[in-house]
Amino acid sequence: MTLPFLILALLTLAGGIASMTLRRLVHCALALTVAFAGLAALYLNLGAEFAGLAQLLVYVGAIAILIVFVILLTRGGDTEGEPAFSPASLGGAIIALAVFAVLAWAVETSSIAHPISIPSAPPNTMQQIGLTLMQRYVLPLEVIALMLTAAMIGAAIIAVRERRNEAAAAVDAPGTEMRVG
Amino acid sequence: MNPLAGCLIVSALLFAIGLAGALTRRSAILVVAGIELMLNAANLNFIAFWRFGPNPEALTGFMFVIFAIAVAAAEAAVGLALIVAIYRHAHTSDVSEITEMKG
Amino acid sequence: MTWIVRNLWLIPALPIFAAGISALLKRNQQRLSATLAIGSMSASLVLALIAFAEALSQPARQVYNFHWLQFGNNWLSLGWLLDPLAAVMLVMVTFVGLLIFIYSTGYMAHDDNAGRFFCFLSLFAGAMLGVVIANSLLLLFMCWEVVGLTSYLLIGFWYHRPAAAAAAKKAFITTRIGDLGLLIGMVWLYGQSGTLLFYANGTGCLEQNALASMAAHTAGGFAVITAIGLLIFCGAVGKSGQVPLHVWLPDAMEGPTPVSALIHAATMVAAGVYLIARVYPLMSGHALAVVAWVGAVTALFAACIAVAQNDIKRILAYSTVSQLGYMMLGLGVGGVAVGMFHLITHAFFKALLFLGAGSVIHGCTEEQDIRNMGGLRRFMPVTFATYSAGMLALCGFPLFAGFWSKDEILHSAHGWSVSLGPFYLGAIGALLTAFYMTRQMYYVFFGPHRLPQATVSAAETASHAIPAHEIEPVVSAGRDGEACEVSHAHESPANMTVPLSILAIFAVFLGFVGTPAWPWFQSFLEGQHTSLDFARFSEAGLLPLMIWSSLIVFAGLGLGWFLYGRKPIENATDPDALERVAPPVFRALGNRLYVDEFYGATFIRLTRFASAFSAWLDHWIWGGAVRLVSWIVTGVGWFDFSLDRFVVNGGFDLGCRELSFGGRLFARLQNGRVQNYLRVIALALVVLGILLLWGRRG
């Protein structure tokens, strides 16, 4: 528990809390970005450089921006006057608290979380990572590739369909089924 | 507190925060955001175990995190596309107002 | 076995068959019904004559038995027989019956229901003939009952008259009481001898084996044979109107006059006498003594009452009761031949008297009170002549039929070893018989005509309600009458006078078949031949007895002339001569010696009480039990209903409601809110975590 770790952890947590509690959606998105960045730093602190940088690239660079785009597309800024929290959200908060309590309890009581000796930092090289990907985890790699393709096609279909039917949807009654072409 | 436990506590906390947001916020986007936070917390967990676990050379946790990031990205994309689609249909992205699939 | 014996059953079957067809005819087909009746009766007469010829040539008894009903290994057999006794009865019943049928066509000519009348008459004739030829006590009993039934139907022929309906009921019930004794005797006989056939090759109940065994056993001090004989005699007491069951016979005069003539003079009431004659081997000395005494008492009793009656038919009815007593007396003291001879002669002259009375009634436009008649010999000469013949025969005037038969009885009574009491009773009865018949003759046929002219138009049909006919003194408007064309008494048509004449001939001459000089009848019954022999007159005090009985008859006739004949009876309301002499006696006799009133106060009241009690029992106890059961069932049903409604349905409904409530409750989980689903999942995660950790810890 070194100091950098603490600071980074606090930063990440603050970003998380902020993103979940702020009223305006854009602020939430930005706080989320901070949280992602903090996490990336934590990965770097723990010696997982590839993971950290991948985190930055993917999450901060793509997902956070995507979230901002969607906020803009769905006019998230228009819902200022409305309540931020859904009804019966207190129950949800308590449940979340309960989940944390259980997880903390699990951590504290497990023997795995309290190892006797801590191994030293492993020398990780990109070569090792690449070899492992191509040798042992080649199948998940291919599957990931398929999945990403599918996701991309799917998202495009959903978005493009909507744009093509936007004029028709505006005229039609709201209840038209979405047709998957 | 050893580093592993500390990481684990942090990840649990982050997970809880993400869950709280997903369970309490009205906006569907923030629900997705909460889910992303939860995924990230899990990733942190894996990295911690990779780093402080018995066999770091196998890169098991590391691989998992890589794949998890990829999956999370895909999922976020699809989920947000869905939110856009629902917004076009119902003119709201308020989770508590989209209740047609009830029974 | 000759043809006639094999087919003897035709004799009763033909009239029954005619009755059956008559029952199906319509009301206006009277002539067809009468034709059927007369035709079948004629055929039966022819067959009866053939049977008589057969019995003449073959006096031995011929029997035809057949199996009827099987139960287990036993057979109940029925059969018929032909012997001299049966043969004479057959001829008498068919002949007298045929004459009366012909008479009825005239008498009932204006009655709408004549078709029914002839149907019942045929049925009666068939049943009576069945009684005559029966070889089994069971078959006899069955026909006996049918005879009683038809008597009921015919007495109550004009059923809408309350008096007629009551008389029919009285007849049926009174004879039923006698029949109960007959039934018990019959059953006992069957138990003792194992069969009810009279003659069956040695195994019959009147044959030697059975008689010997019954004489040997005793029951309560009596020999079984005596007891059975007395029980069978009970049936005869009822049917033949002996004291104390005589009360129905005078009331039976409510029926039409042909009915009175046929049933209650000639045939049905003779069935009791015939029964005793048929089962004579069963009657031991003690039983015969009882029969003789009952007969003698009846003879005197009824003769006394007849003296003070004012209805022409009632006098004849009591006379019939009295003569039946003589027949029983004859059977008791003298044997089958003595009693049967009087039965045969009595049938003829009593039928004659009744038909003559019917002619008188018809001619006087339904007047039946003798005080309202008078001088009819001028208006109805044929009727007067035949009626006189019958009256003299009944009194026992010398050389007429009744003289020979009654004299046989008195002769046997005089020679009875047990007692002379019946003889004296019979002699006094003969005196009274002559007396009351003379009284009746003077009232009806002599003196001035007292019929009030105002009673002429009794033109009511039988189907309307007619006031109850009473004995005395009210004048009744009898049955239907066409308004007579003449307003005074007149002679009857030919179809009524011809039978009268035929019967009169028999009444005069029939007695000669049984005189002591030529006792053909007695010998025939015993199956022997006899010859004309005047020397028999000098036997054992026979001639003095005949002289004494003739003197008794003359005395009676003289007494009657003295009281009623010397001074003609002027008015209908004049007191009777006897009433002037001894009013209380006359009143008591006129009221029939209060026998009916006595019965009414004792037995009838007892029966009424028993029936009221039974009704109460039926309503409250048995009916109550039934009602109780129905209440219980209703209660159980109501209980089941409430159980079903509240418990089963309620429970079921409650269950369904709970189920749907639970379903609705669970459906609320699916409220379409995604965040709720997430919360539930998270909650489940918490619970799962706790479970796993707790388990691991523990």
Image: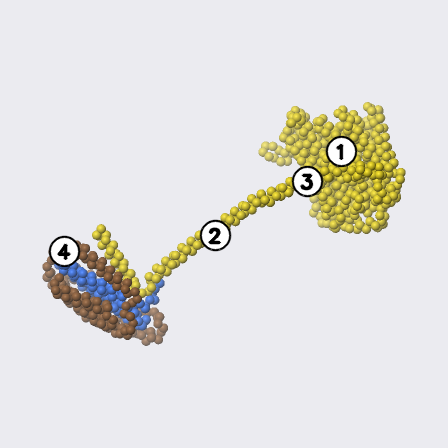
Type of amino acid under label 4: Pro
User: In the depicted view, which residue is nearer to us: C576 or A5?
Assistant: C576
On the image, numbered disc 4 is attached to which residue?
A115
* Whether marks 4 and 1 lie on the same chain: no
Chain assignment, label 2: C
Colour-to-chain, blue: B
- Same chain under badges 3 and 1? The reply is yes
Q: Earlier in the sequence, mark 3 or mark 2?
A: 3
Q: Pointer 1 and pointer 2: residues touching (CB < 8 Å)?
A: no
Q: Which residue is mark 2?
A: C642
Q: Mark 2 or 4, which is nearer the eye? A: 2
Q: Amino acid at mark 2?
A: Ser
* Tag shown at residue C298: 1
Q: Which residue is mark 3?
A: C605
Left-right relation of A116 to C67: left
Q: Colour of chain C?
A: yellow
Q: Is residue C4 visible?
A: no
Tell me the distance, in whole angstroms, between the alpha carbons under discs 4 and 1: 143 Å
Q: Secondary structure at mark 1?
A: helix
**Mark 1 is on which residue type?**
Thr
Which mark is on residue B99? none
Disc 2 to disc 4, C-alpha distance: 74 Å
Crowding near pointer 4: few (<14 within 10 Å), some, many (20+)? some
Q: Nearer the viewer, mark 1 or mark 2?
A: 2
Q: Secondary structure at mark 2?
A: helix
Tag 1 or tag 3, which sits nearer the N-term? 1
On the image, the x and y values in percent for residue A59 come to: 19, 68
Label 3, label 4: how far apart the Cα atoms are:
123 Å
Mark whose residue sits in front, 3 or 4: 3
Residue at figure coordinates x 14%, y 64% from the top left = A6
Q: Are marks 1 and 2 on the same chain?
A: yes
Q: Residue at x 82, y 47 (%)?
A: C365
